[in-house]
Image (cartoon, rainbow, N blue to C red):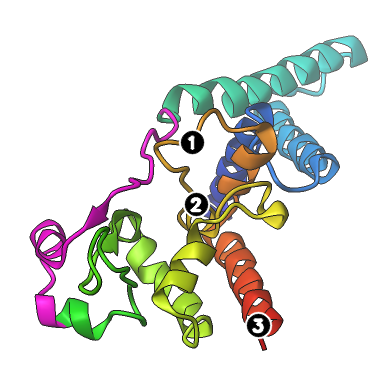
Amino acid sequence: MARATKRSRETVRGDLIALATGHFSGDPGALLDRVARSLLQGASAELQRTHSSSEDSLLSQKRMRGAVAASLREILLHERQQTPPASTIFLPVTKLSPEEVVAQTGISKSTLYRGDGSRFYSVVPTGMQNGRAYPAWQFVGEVPSLMPPVLSILTRKTRIQVNSFMLSEQDSLNELSPAEVLSGMAFEDRGELSAAQARMLSLSQEARINKVMMLAKLEVADSE
């Protein structure tokens, strides 16, 4: 029970920080209900430790207020002190040669080529009629593990079409590109994010990949 309570309070802390910074994507009213329950649980536990039968009603009320205030400070102040600064990682806009991908990721060239179109995608290098260049954003963070289900939907699209889809800003994604939403990071050449865009990028990984996959399915359906 203690572990469950601790996890619950940690979740409340994180959601409150997200709400305060404009990154909370859930129902604010439901979150406040959870905060109230958490505060009351903490206050009740404190009163059980300090309450005696001789205390009058006024003293009990004062202790209740003090316990609630202490619980609120724990939820807000302690978590804010422990929370690391927001990530400043951005998606690169450059393209990598196969040799550069191998050097940066450690995967073999044969693995890279076999995965082209299913795990990664390539485009024709600028100024050339053939060859492979890999948009570098695909190899940032956890993106490599998120790409396969999206590429499996776009399997009938050409390399140019796949690249265009991944990099084009979409109305349904608050003017972000599928690449940005999939990764949860903005491109390095993007200006300041709007509040709506920041909230979109802060969604859970599952929510973000589902949005991109749904959009990919619409992309394929529109071309049939």
In this image, 81 relative to 201: left or right? left
Q: Quadrant of residue 50?
A: top right
Measured from the top left, where is residue 183 in percent x and y? Answer: 45, 55
Secondary element under disc 1, as helix, strand or loop, is loop
The disc, 1 or 2, on the residue closer to the chain's N-terminal end is 2
106 within the magenta span:
yes
Residue shown at the point (42%, 68%) measured from the top left? 146
| SS for dot 3 | loop
Q: Residue 100 at x, y = what percent?
A: 12, 58
Q: Which residue is mark 2?
A: 180
Left or right: where 156 falls relative to 173: left
Query: Pointer 1: residues within 10 angstroms few (<14), some, or many (20+)?
Result: few
Q: Which mark is residue 190?
A: 1
In this view, 135 is above or below 42: below
Residue 202, visible in the rendered structure: no
Mark closer to the chain start, 3 or 2: 2
Q: Is residue 175 visible?
A: yes
- Measured from the top left, where is residue 74 in percent x and y? 58, 25
| Residue to which mark 3 is pinned | 223
Look at the image and give the residue range highlighted in magenta. Answer: 85-110
Looking at the rendered structure, the secondary structure element under dot 2 is helix
User: Which amino acid, by three-letter code, is at mark 1?
Assistant: Arg
Asked whether the residues under the numbered discs 1 and 2 touch, taking CB atoms below 8 Å apart as contact, a structural biologist would say: yes
Residue at x 81% of width, y 23% of height: 53
